[in-house]
Amino acid sequence: MSARVLDWACLVRSAAGEIVPGDRALVLVKGRGALAVAIDGLGHGTAAAEAAEVALDSVRAFDGPDDVAAIAEHCHRQLRATRGAALGAAEFDADRGTMRWLGVGNVEGRLLRRTRRVVHSLVPVAGIAGHDMPPLRVCELPIALGDLLLLATDGVSPRFADDLAPAGPCQAIAERILRRHGRAHDDALVLVARYLGGQG
């Protein structure tokens, strides 16, 4: 975890009867920027996990511009030999005070403001990274100290942020969401990241 840009936690749980979850997440911090990604390999089990790992490896290996759309397009190309995946990604820029995010398929995203009861929802495009990905929709929002990003796969009810208090440790918030809103029939992942404003 970074003491400069983000504090974060992630929890994942396999679908009932499965040993390996097909959901993965990654947070990368570089200087005063950060990237948070949630991946849901299509279906569940081993093949879904393999697709999710390919997606994460592609994000780690990406050496292009720090641009969330370029990263998603690269991920799409690398996933073509797999069953594909849904993904949600958010890019933080502490110098500009912004967050840019996008989604493909059934990944939910919420941004909860610390100072007032305002919730922004990610609007993903319909499709599957690796197979059928339409033009991406990138949204940019101002970000402030203490704002809370939530990314969740479709093993978590879309109502996971309803009446959610953004205070408290990220780990505790993730545990509460998964306990209350996780669905047993599918892999479930929740990523919680609090923006720290790039302070030293």
Image (tube, grey):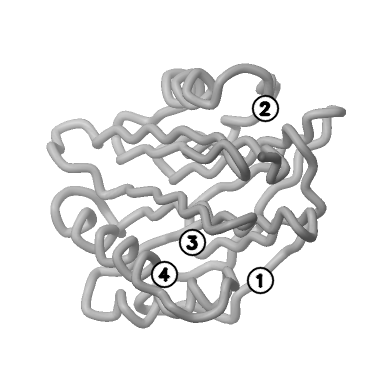
Residue 68: x and y, percent? 57, 69
Whichever of labels 2 and 3 marks the residue nearer the N terminus, that label is: 3
| In-front residue for pair 123/63 | 63
| Residue bearing the label numbered 2 | 162
Q: Are marks 1 and 4 in contact (CB under 8 Å)?
A: no
Q: Which residue is labeled 4 in the image?
A: 128
Does residue 83 appear left or right of residue 164 in this picture?
A: left
Of the pair 185 and 138, the residue shown nearer to us: 138
3D distance between C-alphas at marks 2 and 3: 21 Å
Q: Which residue is mark 3?
A: 105
Residue 194 horizontal/vertical position (percent): 63, 35
Cα distance between the residues tagged 1 and 2: 24 Å
Q: Is residue 184 left or right of residue 173?
A: left
The CA span between labels 1 and 4 is 14 Å
List the residue tagged with mark 1: 137
Badge 3, how many Cα within 10 Å: few under 14, some, many 20+?
A: many
Q: Amino acid at mark 4?
A: Ile
Rendered residue at 68%/69% (across/down): 138
Q: Which quadrant of the structure image shows residue 91? A: bottom right
Residue 11 x/y as whole percent: 38, 32
* Label 3 secondary element: loop
Q: Residue at x 60, y 75 (%)?
A: 136
Against 137, is 41 above or below? above
Q: Amino acid at mark 3?
A: Gly
Residue situated furthest front in the rendering: 200
